[in-house]
Image (cartoon, rainbow, N blue to C red):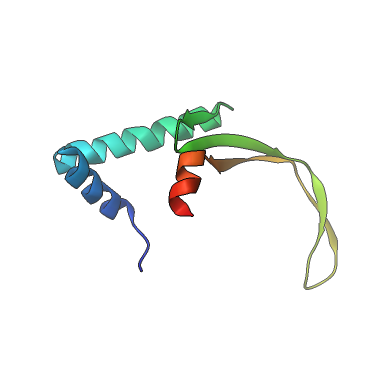
Amino acid sequence: MADITKTDLVEYMVEKSGLNKADAERALAALLETVMEALSRGQSVQITGFGTFEPRHRAARKARNPQTGEEIDVPATTVPAFRAGKALKDVVK
């Protein structure tokens, strides 16, 4: 079974919503842009029944270069994370 691409997702949105392709593309683009903007501002996006997109802080740490064994410093950073909601978890089971 192949993974679903963004194009496939737009096609499914057209089938399920009755939107035309251009409107479905704009709706998906708006959703993705809104989620990215919120995460960049440090906000979480909760979609009830689906899940929560949230920024997570990763602390600075030491790591090793596997080829040389040299210890390097990895700076602190913020990464995007997704936590699935109960309804999504139940469907995937």
Tell me what residue is drawn at x 46 percent, y 44 percent. 88
For the N terminus, the image quarter is: bottom left
Residue 77, percent across and down? 69, 40
In front of the other: 74 or 24:
24
In front of the other: 49 or 62:
49
- Residue that protrudes farthest toward the bottom in the picture: 67
Residue 47, percent across and down? 45, 31
Q: Is residue 56 left or right of residue 16?
A: right
Residue 85, percent across and down? 51, 39
Q: Quadrant of residue 72?
A: bottom right
Q: Quadrant of residue 33?
A: top left
Q: Is residue 57 left or right of residue 82?
A: right
| Figure disc tally | 0
Q: Is residue 63 left or right of residue 36?
A: right
Residue 52, percent across and down? 52, 35
In front of the other: 65 or 24:
24
In front of the other: 22 or 2:
2
Tell me what residue is drawn at x 20 percent, y 38 percent. 17
Tell me what residue is drawn at x 33 percent, y 56 percent. 5
